[in-house]
Image (tube, rainbow, N blue to C red):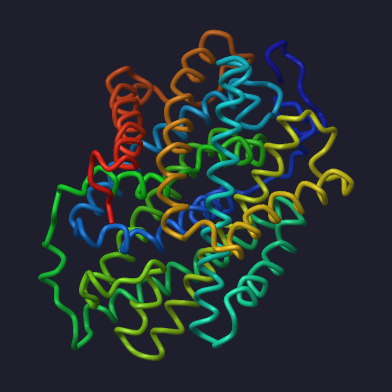
Amino acid sequence: MDGSGIANTNTGSVYEEGALKVHKLTPMEVIFTIVGCGIGSGCLGTAYSARLAGFPVITFWLIVSGILTLCSMYYVAESALRTKKLVQLPGLAERYVGTTGRFLIFLAVVINSISCLIAYFNGSGNIINQMLGIPNWMGTFIFLIPAAIVTWFGLKAVGVAGKYMSILMAIMVIILTVASLASKDAEVSRLVVSNWKYAVPIFNVAAFSYIGQYLVPDLARGLSHDPKKLAPSLLIGQIIVAALLILVPLGCFVVNPANEITQVATIAWGEAIGLWAFFVANIFALIAMFTSFCPITQTLISNIVDFFNFKSDEAVKTRLPIMIIIIGIPLFLTLSGMVGFVDAIYFSGTFAAAIMAILPIIMVRRARKTGDIEPEWNCGKLASWPIQGIIIIMYGGTIIYAILGAFGILPAGW
């Protein structure tokens, strides 16, 4: 039943459908949607971005940013569970922060999503070029067409595809890591070399790898029939993401000198182990980008529908033009060579991650005062001021660093 004691018979939950339709997800599908989104272009760029800082630095930041992002995701989850009408992140921000919050969150979602798609189009074209010897643009389209088809069928299709592909990815990363450690060229001593001078900008790339706050309302929508399972699913998904994110640079640093690590890490990583590993590593990379492309594109579609108050995210006359625009823009920027792989990750991680980490602090505090529903689960002490203060300092500081770094006042990360 809802806050007034009336059950919603359409969805079987206390929550109401709006323009965004409810398609039930299982906890496993939620977990692997998080995994699929987290193991994408971010994991492929961490080794390159950290080549001057070293493996200890990127590992430290992957753990820290993973914990802080999970807290932020919990704030969004609690805010969503306290709100009767199922809306996207901009809708939640408008409800609890106001028009400015709605605009900032929507801008962050768009910037991050477009940056992700640029990274996927750059990375997939580069990988397929290395594997098949065809032009980069052709490789990009080979990746794009099936990914767009899965996305077209919506959240449920994305969840099902992500579940099986994410399991396959995890197996492949473990095999490659073991092969790296067993390689005749392995130098474990590289794993302890560090230069903390470059630590701050590396946090931005680590933060990008975890950005998933904008997924949470979609996942809350999918689990609105059993909301108490949302938080455990987010936690399990985030733990798996953290483990896999650490294994990728570990494998790269063990078998590659820092100056030989490529922007798309799996290219040099696979070459260093052997021909079989080259193909396994790069198939993993393509799957990683595929499983991220689908939920990120789907979520961007539903954000646009929610932001502009369109009637439905499933109507062809709405969904088709939105997909053409949100795929066309990053595709043009990629094929024109205007934006590179790691640059897209860095700037997205800086600004989008900061907005999506900080604004949910305000959202959850106001949702506790003015929300519609007292949910079965809440963040508890994870929403205390000491933790939220750390999030504000960390993510706010990265914006200042990025601006000063762009003017050459502070060192860039790579």
Residue at the limit of the structure toward the top, as seen here? 369
Q: Position of residue 173 (x, y in %)?
A: 38, 71
**Residue 384 versus residue 338 in the image, above or below:** above
Residue name at image x 71 percent, y 44 percent: 301
Q: Nearer the viewer, residue 55 or 221?
A: 55
Residue at the limit of the structure toward the front, as seen here? 407
Quick check: 88 left or right of 21? Answer: left
Q: Nearer the viewer, residue 47 or 168?
A: 47
**Residue 254 versus residue 222 in the image, above or below:** below
Q: Position of residue 341 (x, y in %)?
A: 46, 60
Q: Name the image quarter holding the N terminus.
A: top right
Q: Position of residue 128 (x, y in %)?
A: 55, 79
Residue at the limit of the structure toward the bottom, as seen here? 275
**Residue 282 versus residue 74 in the image, above or below:** below
Residue name at image x 50 percent, y 26 percent: 377
Quick check: 49 left or right of 194? Answer: right
Residue name at image x 53 percent, y 44 percent: 112
Question: Which picture quadrant has residue 247?
Answer: bottom left
Q: Nearer the viewer, residue 334 or 176?
A: 334
Q: Position of residue 234 (x, y in %)?
A: 47, 43
